[in-house]
């Protein structure tokens, strides 16, 4: 059933990571149930993987089981969609643009899978995935049962959801979306604009896992700093000060450790420039958090998962 000793670096955008003792890619509910049942019998740790675009794996081997969701279900009825958690955001956007369905234009260029986007309530350009969600179907790895939550039961908030906290033992499996009819050309143009923006401003020429830290809620930004960077505050969808501004102000652009570097192009990205290790990246994460706390009194919170 399981593959064994699979390099996680092959399943991470960072190209970093040791080997997983067990590795499985369920494509349907039966395979998922069987896999989780087997993992419970093995009494081993479980890590659920989406697209690998928001995770930093350890250099050490993972002694448990990694389950990479490959549910590619894709059903559309008018403006209602039933989408498997393993569908990539790029594929989803291609289809909704072709169908003339509006509501996800903000996600143009967003990496990873829909399941990962739901777990972290991904957002950009003032939009969030929660705004399009009708329901989320998940599988509880402890009870062995599926359950479905409507939007409000998912406790979505800024880059967060119930699946990161109270329901962290649940595996997101299927998502119901509700979009709106729109103009195909306008939808496609809006998506392409977002993709272009990312390519121009993000360091896509090096392996990375996107923004390392969440942007900072302006409510916790000291008043003097808030006034200084007043023009930089953006709605995302709450008022935030981009973390990249703080890192640039602190002189952290281009700082490196081993094969990892705080990107000069966008300092909230730590890029793998030369066969970086997980330790290299973690040291830079610690350096950033320490520096920002010392200089500005702000405690940064990681947006990525560290395994």
Image: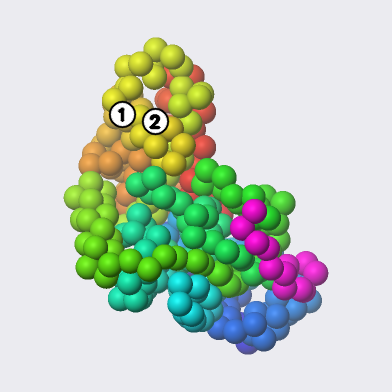
Is tag 2's residue or tag 1's residue first in the polypeptide sequence?
Answer: 1
Q: Position of residue 164 (x, y in %)?
A: 62, 52
Q: Which residue is mark 2?
A: 241
Tell me the residue at 39%/19% (across/down). 226
Give the answer, above or below, for where 41 lies relative to 58: below
Q: Does the stretch in magenta take in 149?
A: yes
Q: Residues within 10 Å of mark 2 (few under 14, many from 20)?
A: many
Please tell me whether residue 224 is drawn above or below residue 214 in the rendered image. above
Q: Which mark is residue 232?
A: 1
Quadrant (top left/top right/bottom left/bottom right) for the N terminus = bottom right
Q: Quadrant of residue 251?
A: top left
The chosen color scheme is rainbow
Q: Are marks 2 and 1 in contact (CB under 8 Å)?
A: yes
Residue 38 percent coordinates (x, y): 73, 79
Report the span colored magenta. 140-152
Q: What x and y, as percent, mark residue 99?
A: 34, 76
Residue shown at 23%/46% (left/top)? 201
């Amino acid at each position: 059933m399981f593959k064994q000793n699979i390099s996680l670096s092959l399943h991470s955008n960072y190209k970093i990571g040791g080997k997983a003792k067990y590795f499985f890619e369920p494509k349907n509910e039966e395979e998922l149930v069987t896999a989780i049942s087997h993992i419970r019998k093995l009494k081993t740790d479980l890590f659920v993987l989406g697209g690998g675009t928001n995770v930093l794996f350890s250099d050490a081997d993972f002694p448990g089981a990694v389950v990479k969701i490959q549910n590619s279900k894709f059903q559309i009825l008018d403006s209602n969609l039933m989408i498997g958690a393993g569908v990539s955001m790029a594929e989803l956007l291609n289809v909704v643009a072709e169908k003339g369905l509006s509501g996800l234009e903000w996600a143009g260029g967003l990496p990873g899978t829909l399941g990962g986007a739901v777990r972290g309530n991904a957002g950009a350009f003032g939009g969030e995935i929660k705004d399009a969600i009708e329901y989320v179907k998940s599988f509880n790895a402890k009870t062995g049962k599926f359950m479905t939550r409507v939007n409000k039961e998912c406790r979505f908030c800024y880059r967060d959801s119930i699946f990161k906290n109270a329901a962290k033992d649940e595996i997101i499996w299927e998502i119901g979306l509700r979009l709106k009819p729109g103009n195909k050309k306008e939808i496609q143009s809006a998506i392409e604009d977002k993709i272009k923006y990312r390519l121009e401003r993000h360091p896509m020429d090096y392996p990375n896992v996107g923004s390392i830290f969440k942007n900072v809620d302006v409510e916790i930004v000291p008043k003097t700093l808030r006034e200084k960077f007043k023009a930089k505050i953006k709605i995302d969808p709450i008022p935030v000060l981009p973390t990249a501004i703080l890192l640039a102000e602190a002189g952290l652009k281009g700082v490196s450790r081993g094969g990892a570097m705080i990107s000069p192009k966008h300092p909230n990205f730590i890029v793998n420039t030369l066969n970086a290790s997980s330790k290299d990246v973690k040291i830079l994460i610690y350096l950033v958090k320490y520096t920002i706390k010392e200089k500005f009194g702000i405690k940064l919170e990681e947006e990525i998962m560290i395994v």
